[in-house]
Structure formats: C-alpha cells, structure tokens
Image (cartoon, rainbow, N blue to C red):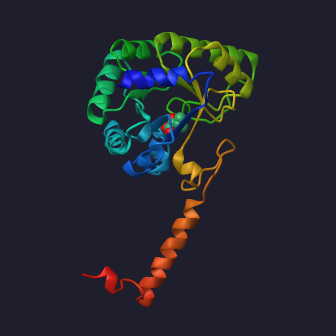
Amino acid sequence: MSSNKIIKIKNKKKKTKIVCLTAYSKNIAKILDNQCDIVLVGDSMANVLYGMKNTNEILLETIIKHAKAVRLGLNKSLMVVDMPAKTYRSTSEAKKNAKLIIKKTRCDAVKIESNKMNFKIIKALVKANIPVMGHIGFTPQFKKRFKIFGKTSLEKKKLLNEAILIEKAGAFSLVLECVTESAARLITNKIKVPTIGIGSSSSCDGQILVTDDIIGLSGFYPRFVKKYLNLNKLILKAVRKYKQDVKKQYFPLKKHTY
Ligand code: KIV
C-alpha cells in the first residue's frame, strides 16, 4: 500500500506538481486528505504549536502522539513523519526510532534532515524497507542561523552533490528548504526523484508549506509564505461574539439547554 503510494509520488516528477502541507491534528489532516499528495507531520510543530524556540526541543513521543492523531484523518495522502533531532545519530538509533514511528503511527515514510554526512543512515533505513524523504538547504535541526543556500557556484555544486548522494542512498523525494531558484532548478533537473520546495522557487517538482502559516494562524510570514486566509482574525471575531453573547445572556438559549 505504502509502496504504491510512493511509486505514484515518484511518477509525478515532470508530469504534475506535487502538493504538500503539514498537519499536526486529525481535523486538519481530514481537510488536507483530499487535496494534498503528501501530508507531513513536521517537527515545525515545536515552534508553531508549542511555542518552543527551535525544532530540536520536540520529543519523539510528542511527534508520535500527533502523528497518531493525523493518521485518523488521513486516508489518501502519503503520510510522512519527521524524525526529531537526535533520534537518528547512528544507523541503529535511526532504525529503532523509525520502526517505532511506523509501528505506532502507521505512517508511510519518515523524513530526515541532512547534515551532509548521514547518507548511510538513509541507506540503512531504505534497506530496512523504510521509505525516506530527504531534506537539504536550510535544515533547522542542524543550523542555528537562517540563511539562503546555493547563492555561489561552489554552494550550488555542494548542494547538488548532497542531493545526488541522498538520491543514491535511496530517498524517494527530497525537500529543498530556502534554496536559490538556480540551485533548485539544477538539482531538480539532475536527480530522478521529486524535489519538494519550501522557499525554493517554482522550479521544484512540488511545494510544501506549514498549514498554520497559509491559514494565518501562526503569525509567521517570511517571504516564501503566501497567506490564503486570516484565521486569527476570524477566530477573534467568533470569540468576541461569544463573549458578548455570554455577557448579554444571548447564550445559551433554551435550544442549547437540556
Ligand atoms: O517541519 C516541517 O514542517 C518541515 C517543512 C517545513 C518542510 O520540515
């Protein structure tokens, strides 16, 4: 089942753009299911949901808890779960934790960030029949400072080399985060697996954004985010109306009462 879904995603390269978003809960997953090819239970939940300073603070058990909820809302989309920082420092640690994630959440694949050295971790996971999505460019688990990657020809070369090694290790797709358009185009044209961009231009085979950002809930709007809805404003409007109703005793009415 999972392998069919993965083949379908790989086959979309150069044919149709791949649509991806994040989900941390059942209700959001249910909405995304009919719309997205891939739904990622991202470690971005650390900042977005828990207000933590960085993604490295999120625990494996927390990701698993949210991924179990997401599973309840997902049927069609490929479900990928982020492996949190320090859960894949060796092949044995990576295998143990990836197997736990898959067993507990019934996800289709895991995502791991590249530190430019962990290609053999991907290889070991793939060998153990665990589909892996790679992640290069800005990789928050390993980089403290935000920057755009692939500005110089040397950086472009290094990124391409990293992408090729990840593809060779067996990853079925590759997230490019905050990579220049020319680097994204070069990588997308050179590797056979789909590239999924975030802040990395339309040259990628697909796009991913954090759902809370596009619906205006997170308050985080860097240049690469397009805000499609101001949910903060809509929620505030509803809460104010509720407050007013309670104060004026317009709520609850007889019809809300047993
Ligand atoms: O954690 C996350 O949401 C991610 C995406 C931004 C790619 O890794």
Q: Residue 96 or 68: which is nearer the viewer?
A: 68
Q: Residue at x 31, y 31 (%)?
A: 101
Vertical placement of residue 232 versus 107, above or below: below
Identify the residue at horizontal 64%, vertical 49% (top origin): 221
Q: What quarter of the picture does the C terminus occupy? A: bottom left
Residue 127 occupies quadrant: top left
Residue nearest the viewer, comparing 53 with 205? 205
Q: Pinpoint residue 161: horizontal percent, then vertical percent.
A: 61, 12
Residue 149 in the image: state x and y as whole percent.
Answer: 67, 27
Up-down relation of residue 124 to residue 177 (above or below): above
Residue 44: give x, y in percent of width and height.
49, 41
137 or 239, nearer to the observer: 239
Q: Is residue 55 visible?
A: yes
In this rendering, the count of numbered labels is 0
Residue at the spot x=50%, y=72% of the render?
238
On the picture, is 86 further left or further right than 151?
A: left
Q: Residue at x 45, y 45 (%)?
A: 45
- Which residue reaches farthest left? 258
Whether residue 114 appears in this view of the structure is no
Q: The N terminus appears in which quarter of the rendering?
A: top left
Q: Is residue 178 left or right of residue 126?
A: right
Question: Quadrant of the rendered structure where residue 60 is?
Answer: top left
Q: Nearer the viewer, residue 226 or 155?
A: 226
Judge whether 127 appears above or below 104 on screen: above
Which x, y percent locates residue 16? 61, 28
